Image (cartoon, helix red, strand yellow):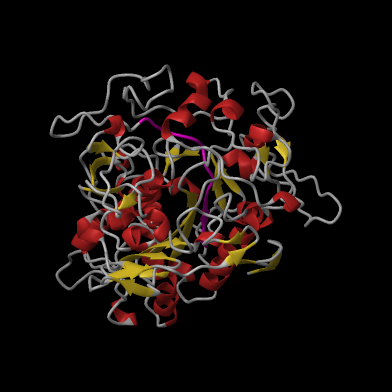
Amino acid sequence: MITRKHPLYLRALATMASVSIMMMSPAGTRAQTETNTPIKHVVVIFQENISFDHYFGTYPVAENLNGETKFHARKDTPTVNNLVSAGLLTNNPNSVNPFLLSPADAVTCDQDHDYGDEQKAFDAGLMDKFPESVGSGGPGCNDVGMGTGVVMGYFDGNTVTGMWNYAQHFSMSDNSFGTDFGPSAVGAINLISGNTFGATLVPLTPKGNPASGAGSISGGGTMGSLIGDPRPGYDDCSSTTPGLANATQITMTGKNIGDLLNAQGLTWGWFQGGFTPTGTSKGLAVCGQHHVGLAGDDATTQSSDGDYIPHHSPFQYYKQSSNPHHLPPTSTAAVGTTDQANHNYDLTSFWAAVHAGNLPAVSFLKAAAYQDGHPGYSDPIDEQTFLVNTINALENTPFWSSTAVIILYDDSDGWYDHQMGPIVGQSDSAPDDNLVAKGSCGVPRPVDAKGDIQNGRCGYGPRQPLLVISPWAKVNFVDHSVTDQSSVIRFIEDNWGLPRIGNGSRDAIAGSLLNMFDFSQNGCHKVFLDPDTGKVTKIE
């Protein structure tokens, strides 16, 4: 555990004193701007459905085929645990060897990433059942002729050029995992609370039919752990989006990181593309915004949503941190505070606040669907445009010298990754778990402070990319420390001296992100990329 006596913190404190970052109130108590590192602004960019090997399987070596954006790595690039170093490109235990997807293949079909099916693919750690368990191909799917074997495909630096260049100039982890197995909503809840337990089924679907917890709540019950993608019960757009008329809805109980930030008086917000309503229906907000990317119109390339996807908005599952009617902030100055918006905003509110000199202490950014990187309705090229434009703009603000941008993903989409993480949470839910055998992800099951069995929390799940972009990030560095989605919560808690969430939250055991920083630097490092090509345009 990192404490305030840890050498990394002591070094950070010395650095902060020299640049006058720390501030104390006259009475000597903690002021809102006091932090345990030079970081006063954390910006979390939470993207969609990528495994580590899917983006970094051959990093830092790209094919550099004719007509593609070239990538050439720095000579001092460190070794990465990927398909090349593991010797798994041509001698793979799966029925199909990994293969390179070109920029022309950027738009792929969505793979199976259900809680139990992902465990089947892991096959008790053999990692050899991906095409059979989670591969998705066939008619209507861009499977590049590979059928279910498309799940073994990966991109290199000729397609995900921006991500590879950020890894070259900042810090990347090759040992970060989903907190649990399962799809988007599971990852989103773990990002903000570290605990998927506490789900309660909303009895009826928006259409008025009886709802079922099967595939959404562990054991198919009305209460338990979230294992699927039910929509948030405290969100009008879960009910007014036509494609969601028969969708399951749940609510969540317990604390999340927003509760801790509010108790400390810190500003924060979740900012998501398409959150601003386009109208109302029977007094409820309607989220009808949509855009066209390489995959097509994100209102038609999905079965249910446009730019705004309710189950990607985790604070809307919790009554205390939701904004059901998608109300706007009362003013730009109020962004980050507790007003009628209750910390849930459109992405446009983030930039309005930034341009007004009001960057919250903690900001979670969620791209509109067409730019979030999710296979099927988005792609790595549209994702690159969003990431690069966002980071370039932040680097041009006066906040950059005290900002850390953390890029990570909600789940793996089922894409092949060869590395299994430690199983820190076990479960034996008969209808759901499949890691060791049918109904088994090991024993004993986790128990919370009340003695309740927290089944359905098998994890860590698949390995995913995690990058830190900051003037304080180590340069061209690969962190091998074990981390997970809840490590973001831990970083926020440690940085502002907040307590742990408790009640079984994985923040209590999460690995630290501090190894990705070097607080002896001058805090001025900037790297600007071209949003179209991902190539470096300027270094400062």
Q: Position of residue 380 (x, y in %)?
A: 63, 54
Q: Nearer the viewer, residue 436 or 194?
A: 436
The percent coordinates of residue 460 (x first, y second) are 41, 33
Q: Is residue 44 above or below residue 114?
A: below
Residue 91 location in percent, x, y? 72, 22
* 519 vs 274, nearest the viewer: 274
Identify the residue at horizontal 48%, vertical 64% (top origin).
307
Q: Position of residue 81 (x, y in %)?
A: 61, 34
The magenta stretch spans residue 460: yes
State the residue at coordinates (27%, 43%). Answer: 211
Q: Which image quarter is the C terminus in?
A: bottom right
Is-magenta flag for residue 119? no
Prevalent SS, magenta region: loop
Q: Is residue 7 visible?
A: no
Q: Name which quarter of the figure residue 531 lies in.
A: bottom right
How many numbered discs, if any? 0
Quadrant where the N terminus is found in the figure: top left
Which residue does the image show at 51% across and 71% down from the upper left?
394
Q: Residue at x 14, y 70 (%)?
A: 27
Q: Is residue 67 left or right of residue 516?
A: right
Considering every residue shown, the one lying at the far right of the view is 66
Q: Is residue 312 left or right of residue 449?
A: right
Where on the picture, by quarter, is residue 265? bottom left
Bounds of the magenta span? 458-471
Does residue 88 sit above or below 187 in this rendering? above
Residue 516 in sight in this render: yes
Q: Is residue 106 above or below residue 426?
A: below
